[in-house]
Image (spheres, rainbow, N blue to C red):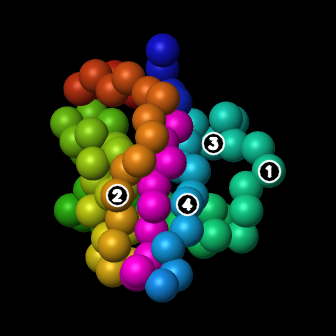
Amino acid sequence: MAGGMAIFEIGENGSRRAVRVFIRPKDEKNLSDDEIEAKEAILEEFLKPEYAGKVGNTLDPYKITEKILTERYGHAKMVETHFEWRPNIRY
């Protein structure tokens, strides 16, 4: 299976919420406002030199997403996944 999605729990204790994150934009349907905000934060970070060209090639996109969301929201934990990631495969 190429692509896929994961659900992350984000936010601090009193304001935790779940967001879906997809590898391929064409899989995204009916994103919530929280999911759109998270997606924009993730894409912004993916463009930085630390990640540019590496995410999905040598870096697991969901592990990096969890790190980015943790930095942005104070807490992020992947709670459900439906994906397969293999290094050097373009999704």
- How much space separates mark 4 and mark 2, taking CA atoms? 9 Å
Label 1 near label 4: C-beta < 8 Å? no
- How much space separates mark 4 and mark 1, taking CA atoms? 14 Å
**Three-letter amino acid code at the position of disc 4:** Ala
- Between disc 3 and disc 1, the foreground one is 1
| Relative horizontal placement of residue 50, taking residue 56 as reference (left or right) | left
Q: Where is residue 55 in the image (x, y as percent from the top left)?
A: 31, 45
Mark 4 crowdedness (10 Å alpha carbons): few <14, some 14-19, many ≥20: some
**Three-letter amino acid code at the position of disc 2:** Lys
Vertical relation: 60 (above or below) 11 = above
Q: Determine if residue 18 is in view.
A: yes
Mark 3 crowdedness (10 Å alpha carbons): few <14, some 14-19, many ≥20: few
Name the residue nearer the viewer: 56 or 48. Answer: 56
Q: Say whether disc 1 or disc 2 marks the residue closer to the N-terminus.
A: 1
Q: Position of residue 33 (x, y in %)?
A: 71, 70
Q: State the residue position of label 4.
A: 18
Q: State the residue position of label 1.
A: 30
- How much space separates mark 2 and mark 3, taking CA atoms? 21 Å
Q: What residue is rendered at 27% in x and 39% in y?
A: 60
> Which structural element holds mark 1?
loop
Q: State the residue position of label 3.
A: 25
Magenta residues?
5-13
Q: Say whether disc 4 or disc 2 marks the residue closer to the N-terminus.
A: 4
Q: Say whether disc 4 or disc 3 marks the residue closer to the N-terminus.
A: 4
